[in-house]
């Protein structure tokens, strides 16, 4: 999903050229496009990791914890592996973690549950809310250990676990927002004139609750990267020697005083990516907001 | 003795010094200037020390201890020592006053950072080491170990073995008293033995280390006989280990919660136990040895995270903390503490999956694996240099282990020979060899993961591809009990006798044997292992030579891959005087310390 | 209101029932049980003996029998005892709850105190320097895992300040100062990420509200900006913020595990992790149920607060 396509105005007039339109959108949402640019760069690094890294991220040399130098621009970690190569390859894991857990699982599952509950209320709400409550009240660590224990330790399984853990939050937000939106006059009006539920939800409810969900998505994308670290810390996530920023930061904490570069660079990578996700999310929200756009 | 010993210990010098490990036991001759270890083998791979050297530990430079002494074999020297800086300088460099101030009004309390929660003091049921560590100050057994790992009297003043080897008779110390003031009697020993063996509590110790015990008979008030099903030469040592061995007063389980409360005989009483938080010990004023203990109590704060223990040392909040070798590096130069890095039993290893991959039944394959491993690199990267090569019996385990010079020979990396063996076994350059999974867990011991990563790279050199599966600890343990572990990374801790390191690995009736391991001379191996286990007529020297012979056979055709023996690294405040580390990994030395 | 309250309490019953079912089956699906944990790899014990050990812990029964036995025990108010040290679970939880509650409460309060004003200012002065700084700070909070922050706090306090709190934990009511000094680092470590989340939620909700029609109306009516802010904007913006805070308080009860572990605090989260690591089923089940109960209560309070701040939501 790119903000450029999403930001196409609903007007019927065909804009002159793609580039002209893009330029206009960039001027309109500079922060959002900055975020998008950051995310794109990270995606690009992840895709081209094979060509732009000097060493195999798993390869160990006999030195260890060497500070950054000409051969190893970001230094060596505790096994004598190139930190630069590992940070670049780590982008793959972190993006994958975020996309699988949040975009593919938590957001759709949570939104559907929450909107249905908030829109129909009554017994639908009662049942769905109970399911969400049960998931919520269940400590995430147990859920993660159980899922990984049953299906085996792998990054994908850990991400499924994170997705399931995050879904209730989306459901709760979607429900809360739907509740407040569903009472708005124009929706009540649409209902009384007999518009189809699906249409009302699609045309009126979703656009109006999108903002908090987008913010939550960008938040969740950021925290998923860290959650992956916590799970890997317990041996439930990324399998060694695959590099992930979270695990690098987790093990790097042991060497913070001795070799800060082992933790600082993956930490910076996380920060920049989180920044990118959030700025892009802000831009997307602004672009999506019907009032803001039409007003 | 104890004091002079602590002075002799290597201490971390400046930040630039490597972590030293004094692998010699307390019985070792003092490392004087002339006995400074000389490297007998070049490091397996040249180490390039980067300009900012704080992090690179030089490869261990082991030396051979004279075989006649009971010395541990290897000692690594700190770089500082090599360049002439006195290693003791750092120890005495800081004023003790800077260290932990005694809390409370002048009471002499030792503050200890405990790195594990004891959970329960029911040593019959509990198998976690932290349980033994938590209860050793208030519970005792019939026997104990001295600093040289000799079995010495404890609650029992003396004992003798029957001529047929089928019983031990223990004379209880007349001065031994429970914390509630009652005398220790033969009834207590009998009750404890009955409980250990009773089907109600289902002790796993009873099935294992104590499987030879038939029961206990009261001879008189102060004399008790332990009856055996088979000769049990390791018996007194097993009691001394305090694993499944502590003595309870009769009807203990009816008198108090045996898991969280205690009435023992030790130098300290259990004052308070708050799981996950603290264990508080107070002095037992009526201890049978006068003048012991010399302090008023111990405050044990459970600090699972090493960062917290290190912060506590830096701020002078604790007197004792067990730390990792890289933790020791961080604490190098910290004022008011010395860093002790003595030997203890921590034999890191990797099991081989005979029952899953029949390829390992070929002696040449497992020998090739053993030759392919770079153990020096493991010691360097997994332990920051704080370890030594080891056979199945941990190096520095009194004089039981193989001498270092021999280990250097047997365990040297030799990729060419490994490749040759693989080719002979039908896997030239690893061709046709299946991809093997390595099972490991990062929690709670990071060196397991580390070893698996190094071995993965080592095995690539002989063309064997592997995949690492890192698991949650519980799942890893469960996999083991289902016999589904492939290459499994663990470590052996302290066992009271070499037999317990050797028999379970190599005997045809052991777990490895039942999975399909056959030594190329299994018949001889079985015979020797049986002899070590139950020949009560052997002298200690004969048993030692026998144990070494078996260890040699097991290293020559390995049932499992042995990597190294790691050090016991502790930060000890300067205000604590007379502390001696124990090879057992426990802290029996605390009862002798005083506070300056 | 009272009727609504009663209804919500009734609705909590199926939720808690669902939790008991889920936790009960889930812990049994995790590989390994207490017997595996009690018999380490280097202590060889035959399979028959293992089976006997399992029978001793009642693990040989069919799962529904085990469940009925447990649930009827729970119905009588008995959470059972730990398989490891026979400590009654209720007692353990009650001794450990105050600490975790304190951690959760203070970190939520601290983060709300900092983040809500920051979020409001950031929204009102959108795209200003204040907004930018606040947002970058929030990003920082989001990208630092709490365990890492905890390590850094330990590093800085011990190296620079040469200080660590007293080893002997003191309850808040006994000695508030010592207690707060002991919990200061964990509270800061927990609240940073929380601050980031709350700040972003507040900002976003405020922006949303500021462009609603009724805000235009209010402005058109000529109400003072401050009145508009307090009476309309803040009230409405509080809904999502409250939701997030509620979720966080609930989540913190089981989510302080790592922080409790790093700072050596005996709290509820640690009880849970220890239970899982040792496969101490009654402890896991009891703790999860307990956390669920607290969670339900917190949610109820949050929902009641909704009604208080948002006149549009009516409960019938």
Image (cartoon, rainbow, N blue to C red):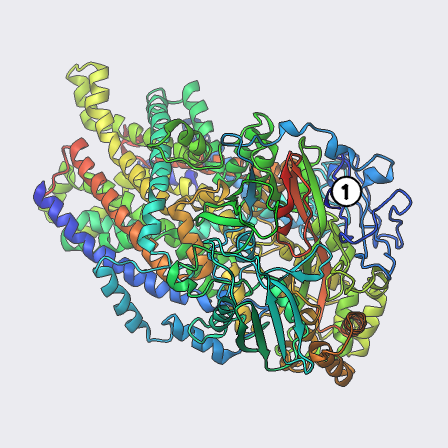
Residue C41, compared with residue C85, is above or below; it is below
Closer to the camera, A119 or B66? B66
Position of B195 with respect to C71 (left or right) is right
Closer to the camera, B299 or B85? B299
Residue C249, compared with residue C32, is above or below; it is above
- Tell me the subunit letter for badge 1: B
Quadrant location of the C terminus of chain B in the rendered image: top right
Q: Which residue is mark 1?
A: B4
| Label 1 secondary element | helix
Closer to the camera, B346 or C22? B346
Residue at 73% in and 82% down: B526
Residue at 83% in and 53% down: B62
Q: Is residue B271 at all visible to an observer of this figure?
A: yes
Characterize the local packing of mark 1: few (<14), some (14-19) or many (20 or more) Cα atoms within 10 angstroms: few
* Image coordinates for residue C196, horizontal then vertical, percent: 41, 33
Position of A2 with respect to A254 (left or right) is left
Q: Is residue A283 at all visible to an observer of this figure?
A: no
* Image coordinates for residue A150, horizontal then vertical, percent: 44, 65
Residue B228, compared with residue A267, is above or below; it is below
* Image coordinates for residue C306, horizontal then vertical, percent: 20, 36
* Image coordinates for residue B26, horizontal then vertical, percent: 76, 52
Position of B13 with respect to A130 (left or right) is right
Outermost residue, bottom side: B523
């Amino acid at each position: 999903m790119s903000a450029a396509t999403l930001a196409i105005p609903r007007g019927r007039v065909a804009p002159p050229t793609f580039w002209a339109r893009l330029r206009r959108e960039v001027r309109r949402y500079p922060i959002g496009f900055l975020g998008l640019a950051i995310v794109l760069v990270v995606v690009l690094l992840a895709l081209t990791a094979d060509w732009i890294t000097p060493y195999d991220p798993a390869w160990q040399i006999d030195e260890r914890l060497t500070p950054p130098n000409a051969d190893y621009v970001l230094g060596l970690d505790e096994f004598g592996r190139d930190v630069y190569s590992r940070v670049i390859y780590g982008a793959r894991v972190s993006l994958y973690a975020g996309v699988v857990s949040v975009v593919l699982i938590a957001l759709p599952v949570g939104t559907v549950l929450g909107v249905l509950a908030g829109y129909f209320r009554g017994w639908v709400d009662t049942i769905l809310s109970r399911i969400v409550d049960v998931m919520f009240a269940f400590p995430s660590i147990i859920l993660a250990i159980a899922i990984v224990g049953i299906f085996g330790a792998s990054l994908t399984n850990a991400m499924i676990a994170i997705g399931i853990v995050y879904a209730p939050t989306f459901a709760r937000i979607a429900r809360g927002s739907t509740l407040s939106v569903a009472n708005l006059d124009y929706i009540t009006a649409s209902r009384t004139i007999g518009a189809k539920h699906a249409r009302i939800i699609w045309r009126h409810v979703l656009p109006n609750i999108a903002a908090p969900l987008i913010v939550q998505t960008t938040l969740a994308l950021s925290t998923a990267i860290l959650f992956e670290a916590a799970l890997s810390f317990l041996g439930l996530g990324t399998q060694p020697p695959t590099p992930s920023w979270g695990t690098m930061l987790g093990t790097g904490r042991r060497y913070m005083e001795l070799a800060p570069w082992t933790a600082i660079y993956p930490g910076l990578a996380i920060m920049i990516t989180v920044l990118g996700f959030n700025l892009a999310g802000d831009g997307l929200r602004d672009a999506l907001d019907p009032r803001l756009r039409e007003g | 003795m104890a004091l002079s010993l602590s002075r002799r210990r290597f201490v971390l010098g400046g930040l630039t010094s490597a972590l030293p490990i004094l692998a010699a036991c307390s019985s070792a001759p003092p490392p004087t200037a002339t006995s400074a270890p000389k490297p007998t083998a070049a490091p397996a791979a040249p180490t390039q020390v980067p300009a900012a050297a704080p992090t690179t530990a030089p490869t261990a430079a082991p030396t051979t201890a004279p075989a006649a002494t009971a010395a541990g074999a290897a000692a690594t020297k700190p770089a500082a020592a090599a360049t002439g800086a006195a290693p003791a300088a750092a120890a005495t460099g800081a004023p003790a006053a800077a260290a932990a101030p005694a809390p409370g009004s002048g009471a002499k309390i030792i503050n200890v950072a405990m790195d594990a929660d004891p959970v329960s003091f029911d040593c019959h049921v509990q198998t976690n080491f932290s349980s033994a560590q938590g209860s050793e100050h208030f519970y005792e057994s019939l026997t104990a170990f001295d600093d040289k790992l000799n079995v010495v009297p404890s609650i029992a003043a003396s004992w003798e073995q029957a001529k047929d080897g089928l019983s031990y008779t223990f004379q209880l110390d007349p001065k031994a008293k429970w914390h509630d003031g009652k005398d220790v009697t033969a009834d207590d020993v009998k009750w404890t033995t009955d409980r250990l063996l009773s089907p109600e509590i289902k002790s796993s110790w009873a099935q294992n280390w104590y499987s030879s015990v038939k029961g206990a008979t009261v001879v008189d008030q102060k004399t008790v006989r332990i009856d055996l099903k088979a000769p049990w030469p390791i018996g007194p040592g097993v009691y001394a280990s305090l694993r499944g061995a502590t003595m309870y007063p009769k009807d203990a389980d009816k008198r108090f919660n045996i898991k969280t409360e205690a009435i023992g005989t030790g130098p300290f009483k259990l004052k308070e136990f708050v799981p996950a938080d603290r264990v508080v010990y107070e002095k037992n004023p009526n201890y049978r040895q006068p003048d012991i203990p010399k302090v008023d109590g111990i405050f044990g704060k459970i600090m699972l995270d090493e960062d917290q223990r290190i912060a506590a040392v830096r701020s002078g909040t604790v007197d004792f903390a067990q730390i990792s070798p890289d933790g020791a590096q961080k604490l190098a130069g910290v004022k008011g503490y010395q860093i002790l890095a003595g030997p203890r039993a921590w034999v890191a290893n990797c099991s081989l999956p005979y029952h899953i991959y029949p390829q390992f039944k070929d002696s040449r394959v497992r020998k090739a694996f053993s030759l392919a491993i770079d153990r020096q690199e493991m010691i360097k990267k997994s332990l920051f240099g704080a370890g030594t090569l080891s056979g199945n019996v941990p190096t520095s385990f009194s004089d039981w282990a193989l001498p270092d010079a021999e280990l250097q020979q047997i365990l040297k990396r030799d990729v060419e020979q490994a490749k040759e063996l693989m080719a002979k076994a039908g896997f030239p350059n690893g061709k046709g060899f299946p991809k093997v999974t390595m099972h490991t867990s990062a929690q709670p011991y990071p060196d397991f993961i580390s070893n698996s990563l190094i071995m993965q790279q080592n095995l690539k050199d002989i063309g064997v591809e592997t995949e690492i599966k890192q698991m949650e600890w519980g799942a890893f343990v469960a996999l083991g009990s289902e016999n589904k572990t492939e290459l499994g990374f663990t470590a052996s801790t302290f066992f009271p006798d070499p037999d317990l390191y050797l028999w379970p690995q190599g005997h045809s009736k052991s777990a490895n044997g039942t999975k399909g391991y056959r030594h190329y001379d299994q018949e001889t191996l079985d015979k020797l292992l049986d002899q070590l286990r139950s020949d009560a007529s052997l002298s200690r020297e004969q048993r030692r030579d026998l144990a070494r012979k078996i260890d040699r056979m097991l290293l020559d055709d390995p049932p499992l891959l042995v990597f190294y023996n790691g050090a016991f690294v502790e930060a000890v405040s300067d205000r604590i005087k007379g502390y001696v580390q124990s090879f057992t990994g426990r802290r029996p030395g605390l009862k002798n310390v005083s506070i300056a | 209101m009272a009727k609504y309250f009663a209804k919500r309490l009734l609705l909590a019953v199926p939720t808690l029932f669902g939790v008991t079912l889920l936790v009960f089956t889930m812990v049994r699906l995790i590989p390994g049980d207490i017997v595996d944990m009690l018999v380490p790899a280097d202590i060889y014990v035959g399979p028959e003996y293992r089976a006997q050990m399992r029978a001793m812990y009642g693990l040989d029964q069919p799962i529904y029998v085990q469940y009925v036995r447990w649930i009827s025990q729970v119905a009588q108010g008995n959470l059972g005892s730990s398989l490891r040290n026979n400590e009654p679970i209720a007692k353990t939880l009650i001794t450990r709850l105050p600490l975790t509650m304190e951690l959760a409460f203070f970190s939520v309060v601290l983060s709300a105190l900092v983040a809500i004003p920051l979020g409001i200012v950031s929204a009102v002065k959108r795209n200003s320097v204040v907004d930018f700084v606040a947002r970058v700070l929030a990003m920082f909070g989001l990208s630092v895992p709490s365990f890492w922050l905890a390590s850094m706090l330990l590093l800085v306090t011990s190296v620079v300040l040469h200080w660590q709190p007293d080893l002997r934990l003191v309850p808040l009511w006994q000695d508030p100062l010592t207690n707060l000094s002991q919990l200061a680092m964990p509270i800061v470590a927990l609240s940073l990420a929380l601050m980031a989340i709350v700040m972003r939620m507040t900002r976003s909700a405020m922006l949303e509200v500021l462009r609603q029609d009724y805000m235009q109306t209010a402005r058109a009516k000529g109400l003072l900006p401050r009145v508009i802010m307090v009476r309309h904007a803040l009230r409405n913006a509080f809904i999502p913020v409250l939701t997030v805070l509620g979720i966080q308080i609930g989540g913190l009860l089981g989510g302080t595990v790592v922080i409790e572990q790093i700072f050596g605090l005996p709290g509820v989260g640690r009880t849970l992790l220890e239970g899982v690591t040792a496969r101490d089923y009654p402890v896991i089940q009891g703790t999860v149920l307990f956390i669920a109960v607290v969670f339900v209560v917190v949610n109820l309070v949050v929902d009641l607060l909704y009604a208080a701040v948002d006149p549009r939501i009516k409960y019938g």
